[in-house]
Image (cartoon, helix red, strand yellow):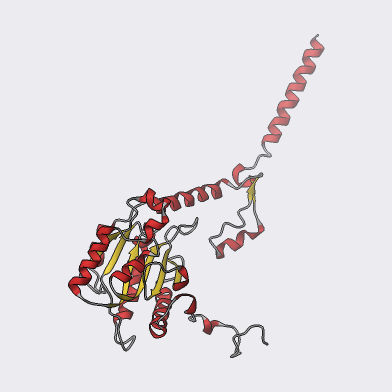
Amino acid sequence: MNTMKKEQKEEVKHEMNNTANRSTDFPSHPTEEAVVENPWERLRSFTDARIGLGRAGVSVPTKHLMNFQLAHAKAQDAVRTPLNTDELIQHLKTQDWNPSDTVHKLHSHAKDRPEYLQRPDYGRMLDADSVDTLTHYRQESNEGYDLAFAIVDGLSAFAIEENITPFLSTLIPQLTSTKQQSTPWKIAPLCVVEQGRVAIGDHIGELLNAKCVVVLVGERPGLSSPDSMGLYLTWAPKTGLTDAYRNCISNIRMAGMSYADASYKAMYLLTEARVMKLSGVNLKDRTGDEVLEHDSKDNNFLIS
């Protein structure tokens, strides 16, 4: 009996020694050691795309999962958060580049955010009060305009709040300067629209008797760009036009297309639209043609 107890004690002692030895083999940072790095990780410095994240077991590493959840939350906030139109209008009125002391506050046919999201068609038309506002203004002023700007919350009010002032402060002075062009643009009072979509600019341009309309709208937020603003240009705007009649400049933001580059493209498109009296698929953006890496005068890549 004593011999058996002695053997059991020896076995327990041996097991304890083995356990102690194994504990020294554990990594000092278990979470870091558990992550298997991806060889593409270094490419992430060139893009916001979620590539080369590595893995932890069969799953995504915790830090990348949490970053994804944060980006998703920001995208949801961008869609749901309302635009502070009163504060924006007051801010716009104080800007030196603003072409008029008047800034129109307008609203689409969608009465609230849920209806706006469920009925995209309601966001393309002004409500009755907004129609009356523009109709009355046009009758009182009895003027026509070369260009109207519609500032629309769209699917990201945050994009408008972040980008509208720096972008317009770059673009509008070029449009109204005699140094930039022989005939400056006559610009209608700015319009700020709640619960609007791109096509609502056609309704606004038609009511203001503007030759051209530019819609600046908060774009649908992505998981790396909740603050992206888009520009849509239409010559001879009227209700019922399709996207084929519009030109688009997308991803205007600090981390995307710079305000200077977007203004340069917008000036080119506006100038060409004014000369050709059209927009959309028949108006091509040639601002990048000079960067082609060959000296051939033939633009057909099929011909060597």
Q: Nearer the viewer, residue 188 or 256?
A: 188
Horizontally, is 41 left or right of 98 in the view?
A: right
Q: Nearer the viewer, residue 123 or 94?
A: 123
Q: Residue 96: horizontal and vertical position, in percent?
A: 24, 73
In which quadrant will I find the C terminus?
bottom right
Q: Residue 159: horizontal and vertical position, in percent?
A: 39, 61
Please count the marks in the image: 0
Q: Please identify the quarter of the rendering in which residue 172 is found.
A: bottom left
In which quadrant will I find the N terminus?
top right
Residue 186 vertical position relative to residue 124 in the rendered view, above or below: below
Q: Residue 131: horizontal and vertical position, in percent?
A: 27, 63
- Residue that appears at 78% across and 15% down: 6
- Residue that appears at 29% across and 69% down: 207
Residue 46 vertical position relative to residue 268 in the rendered view, above or below: above
- Residue that appears at 28% across and 77% down: 145
Residue 87 appears in the rendering: no
Residue 258 vertical position relative to residue 26 in the rendered view, above or below: below
Residue 16 appears in the rendering: yes
Toward the left, the furthest residue is 140
- Residue that appears at 20% across and 67% down: 136
